[in-house]
Image (spheres, helix red, strand yellow):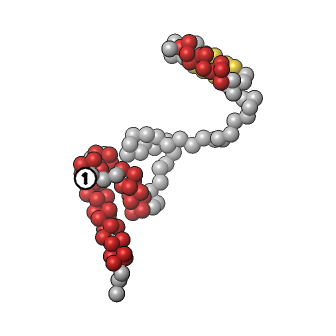
Amino acid sequence: MKSEKTITKQKKRSSWFNHIKQWKTSGQSQSHYCRDNQLKLHQFIYWKQVFNPKQKVKPNMPTESGFVAVQLASAQRSPSSSMVIQLPNGIRIEHAQSNDLALIHEITRWQR
């Protein structure tokens, strides 16, 4: 005989499965569907991943949100790496020390 806890888990899973299925046919964004159905977006995303575990974001392909996933070649920066800032007016500023936060602050403050 199944315990009450197991039955509750199965109902929850079934409920989320139905929500994901209904969302797919609704034509709504995830956030709109969740808002209209009083669901928490982060839970919706979790359950969507549970039911579609192989669905991964491909680099440079827009997601349902319209964002594009970006993969960085290297997350580490050398303290001596250079910095280049290209301003909207065409000015290009190159600086040998990209870790000079005071300079970055002054440049961005000046641009405002």
Q: Is residue 82 left or right of residue 50?
A: right
Instruction: Identify the residue shown where x is 60% and y is 16%.
Output: 107
Q: How many marks?
A: 1
Instruction: Identify the residue shown where x is 41% and y is 45%.
Output: 63
| Residue placed furthest toward the front | 4
Where residue 45 sits in the image (x, y, percent)?
39, 53
**Image quadrant assignment for residue 49:** bottom left
- Pointer 1: what residue? 37
| Residue placed furthest toward the right | 80
Can residue 93 be seen?
A: yes
Where residue 41 sits in the image (x, y, percent)?
36, 50
Instruction: Identify the residue shown where x is 69% and y is 36%.
Output: 77
Q: Nearer the viewer, residue 25 or 32?
A: 32
Can residue 90 be seen?
A: no
**Image quadrant assignment for residue 92:** top right
Q: Is residue 77 left or right of residue 34?
A: right
Where residue 91 sits in the image (x, y, percent)?
58, 13
Q: Nearer the viewer, residue 81 or 31?
A: 31
On the rendered image, what quadrant is the N terminus found in? bottom left
Q: Nearer the viewer, residue 42 or 81?
A: 42
**Image quadrant assignment for residue 10:** bottom left
Instruction: Identify the residue shown where x is 75% and y is 29%.
Output: 80
Check disc 1 and give the amino acid type: Asn
Secondary-structure class at tag 1: loop
- Using the image, determine if residue 74 lies above or below residue 55: above
Q: Bin the neighbour count of mark 1 within 10 Å (Cα to Cα): few under 14, some 14-19, many 20 and up.
A: few
Q: Nearer the viewer, residue 96 or 112?
A: 112
Where residue 23 sits in the image (x, y, percent)?
28, 54
